Image (cartoon, grey):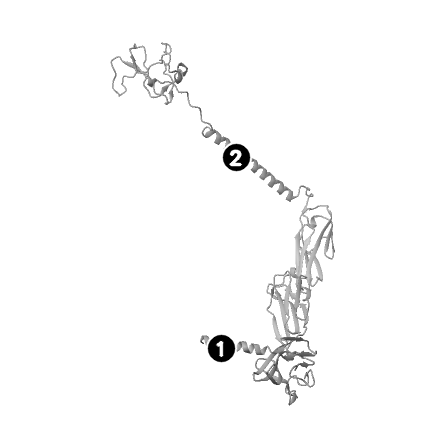
Amino acid sequence: MTMPGLLSALILLIIQGMLAQRVKVEPEVVSYPGQTVTLRCQFLNPGATQLTQVSWIFERTDTERTNIAVFHPTFGVNYPTKSPLAGRVRFMSDPPTLDNPSIQISNVKMTDEGRYICEYATYPSGNEQGVSSLVMLAKPKNTATTVKVSASTTPVIVARCESSNGRPAATISWSTPLKGNVTPPNTTDNANNTVSVQSAYMLAPQPSDNGKDISCMVSHRTMPLPETFPMKLVVEYPPQVQIIGYDNNWYRGRTSAFLTCQADGNPAPTTITWKTLSGLMPETVQVQENRLAVQKVDDTINTTFICEVKNSLGYGRDQVTVFVREFPQPKGVPTGGIIAAILCVIILVALIATIIVMVRKRQRKNIDGPPTHKPPPPMKTNTYSDRPIIRTSVSDSEFMHHETKEEPMTDLSAYHDDKDHHEPSHFSLEDKQIPYQDDRDEDGTMGEEDGYYVTSSARGSSFMSPAVIV
């Protein structure tokens, strides 16, 4: 479609909308069955438009249209007899007018719900209309019940909730701590145009679910608040049995020893039976319904006691084996207290060991590591390297100083500080270092015959201990 065509269609729709708005009606009218409902219609500002006739049309569906009331200023009023509202519809004014052709419907039914069209035949614009929707409300009847079920591992319906004959359809919800599932709602359209809704709750029932709370809530347009139905589940199961009272300290001569048979079932248990594995009940035993009393413990009590409980679904049983001791057990610290004390000791020992290991590691690290402070440098003095080599003749009994690059351990106090620029004091014969004989020159060749020299290394090398006199 071209742009001019779209523009023309838009203008036509606007004009039709403006014309339709000239017929004033109520968009929605709500009513209950048995009431009288009024459907109003008015043509606003006809101006030069001539109103020739008005008709009311009932439209239950998009394909079903029926005239229910017609008025012509010349020919008068007509109510078609084939209308589903025949005998129950009339114009409010008598005689009616084209300006205000409102109608009333008495004793409305649920089947009267639908669209009501007030249509004017006009000249020269043609037919113009307004549409009112009649909404029929019906308050539903709500019910909820539980379903008696037997304990099972297969999901079954345990509760139902129903909202019957309502209009529109109700909404059903569930509230429960159980871990079940809600079935999809089942909606049924009734012949009287009402709706019924059913919902169910499914669960794999267990004995522990018996008596659990479950609630159904029904919400509907006709009710200001949801209607709530609190219920309790009913789960049937055979008896569950437990024997209590044996403390593992039945000794010879003990009196007032008891066993109690606790049973739970739905329906309630009907019979409780005590027996022994050997088949014979000791003479010192007395049975009182679910209680077994031992007047005095002896060796005949060394047996297995069995309790059987029955209801309409079956039976359950439990047994306990009694060991008769020679002497009573000493009553000491409970096992739980002993275990707790052992754990505390283990934790304490582990903590102390961890602290000791950490301290020792830190001490070892401080001993084996480098010094944490830098030693002061030695005082700078004149060295032997600043002095010329002095050759001197010595006798065989004398020794020469061995040439080395290591600084000898000399008395540094014999030298002055560099600031004085003095030579060190002369050594006396007693202070002379013991020489070490070496027949080589500095270049590795032999020196002069009978020539010896004394030297020392420059400062900065490591010290060497003095030679030993042999």
Q: Nearer the viewer, residue 336 or 449?
A: 449
User: Within 10 angstroms of label 1, few (less than 14), some, or many (20 or more) residues?
Assistant: few
Q: Residue furthest bottom?
A: 75
Residue 362, how many percent across, how many down?
A: 50, 32
Residue 61, how many percent across, how many down?
A: 59, 80
Residue 358: give its label.
2
**Residue at the spot x=71%, y=48% of the render?**
298
Location of residue 425 (image quadrant): top left
Is 65 displayed left or right of 285 in the figure? Answer: left
Q: Residue furthest front?
A: 48
Q: Is residue 442 above or below residue 308?
A: above
Residue 291 visible to an observer of this rendering = yes
Which amino acid type is shown beneath numbered disc 1?
A: Ser
Q: Is residue 190 above or below residue 439?
A: below
Residue 314 visible to an observer of this rendering = no
Which amino acid type is shown beneath numbered disc 2?
A: Met
**Residue at the spot x=66%, y=85% of the render?**
86
Helix, strand or loop at label 1? It is helix
Q: Is residue 308 above or below residue 301?
A: below
Q: CA distance from mark 1 to mark 2?
A: 95 Å
Residue 276: give its label.
none
Residue 336, how many percent across, how many down?
A: 64, 44
Is 3 displayed left or right of 34 in the figure? Answer: left
**Residue at the spot x=27%, y=13% of the render?**
451
Q: Nearer the viewer, residue 318 or 193?
A: 193
